[in-house]
Image (spheres, rainbow, N blue to C red):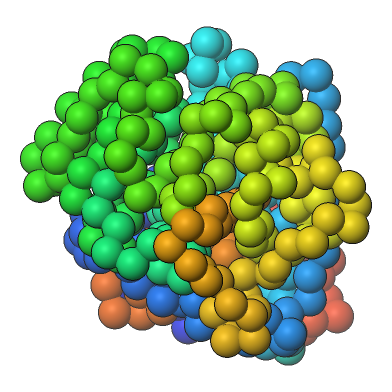
Amino acid sequence: MGNHLPSSLAMVPFVSVDNMMRLVNTIGAPKMMSEICDYIEADFKRWPEFDKTPRVAAHSEEGVIELMPTSDGEYYGFKYVNGHPANMARGFQTVTAFGVLAKVVNGYPVLFSEMTILTALRTAATSALAAKYLAPKGSRVMGMIGNGAQCEFQALAFNEIIGIDTIRLYDIDIQATEKAAKNLRNTGLNIVVCNNAEEAITGVDIITTCTADKQNATVLSDNMVGSGVHINAIGGDCPGKTELHRDILLRSDIFVEYPPQTRIEGEIQVLEADFPVTELWRVIEGQAVGRKSRDQITLFDSVGFATEDFSALRYIHHQLQTIGHYVDLDLLADPDDPRDLFGMLDRAKTTN
């Protein structure tokens, strides 16, 4: 395991799942999400510097496989990620991912990392960042509908960054709720297990929906949502996958990451193509207003965008320089003479 980044350009730091777990447990998940949140916020503040494109998606009946690229001119990053809602029933993860960070100047990667765990951390960090600007001031209670793999990360991030102290849990799968309640029992949060979605959002300041069905689902109906709440909608992230009734959208001020992607994948896919939305980076940068009044319903239509993964990879790369927890991956051919790749291969006959 390396403690300093490798000096040879042929060797690339690789953060395995085991390495990532070591990093998270060394730093602490709440602190790590708070620090990733700072990186995401800093990169949102320089939004115009980034190359931006909707993720490149390959859809099938089983799910989707996506590439999420971006660059700020100094570094290039991408994430490979899948989303297969039926995977859990087969014993697989619904979402898995890995990512790469590279230097633009020479195209050489400087980091290769697992991103299944890291995506959960950055998703929760992004949710809390949006709530920092959009949720009612002094928010303390959040309802969580959908208690799968993302649930605990969201709860801990909102506690650490926003100050949420009570989480009301509901999932159609009671085992998922029991799992989440068990995992959160020693965190200092007040955990309330609810029998239905209506009960879960009673008296809350923030509603988080995080379900996985790839269909135009209605997790929240219009009459369930009262004035003054902030909705953190993170389950809808591909065509045909939504969680909110259309009428909720019409009553809300909607904030998004990157409209060309969100109009394809997010809750707003059911609205007209010119329906007005506000880009979150403009609120963070002070170019637009987030929460305007006590009765306003704010909606963060989150689908996950490449800059957030870039920020998370940038954060991990910086942590490796002091904390370590990686292995050197022999990923790049590095002949003594850049023109003599065949010669390097031929000479290997005598050394292998």
Q: How many marks?
A: 0
- Residue 194 lies, in percent from the top left, at 28, 21
Vertical comparison of 11 with 271: above or below? below
Q: Residue furthest right?
A: 273
- Looking at the rendering, which quadrant does residue 73 occupy? bottom right
Q: Residue at x 30, y 39 (%)?
A: 203
- Residue 250 lies, in percent from the top left, at 71, 46
Q: Considering depth in this image, is 207 or 79 the residue closer to the camera? A: 207
- Looking at the rendering, which quadrant does residue 319 occupy? bottom left
Q: Considering depth in this image, is 320 or 79 the residue closer to the camera? A: 79
Q: Considering depth in this image, is 182 or 159 the residue closer to the camera? A: 159
- Residue 105 lies, in percent from the top left, at 73, 88
Q: Residue at x 42, y 23 (%)?
A: 197
Q: Is residue 286 left or right of residue 256?
A: left
Question: Can residue 81 be seen by looking at this rendering?
Answer: yes
Vertical comparison of 321 with 157: above or below? below
Q: Residue at x 79, y 76 (%)?
A: 51
Vertical comparison of 317 with 93: above or below? below
Rendered-image quadrant of the N terminus:
bottom left
- Looking at the rendering, which quadrant does residue 240 occupy? top right
Q: Is residue 293 left or right of residue 243?
A: left
- Residue 275 lies, in percent from the top left, at 83, 55
Q: Residue at x 41, y 68 (%)?
A: 132
Question: Can residue 117 be seen by looking at this rendering?
Answer: no
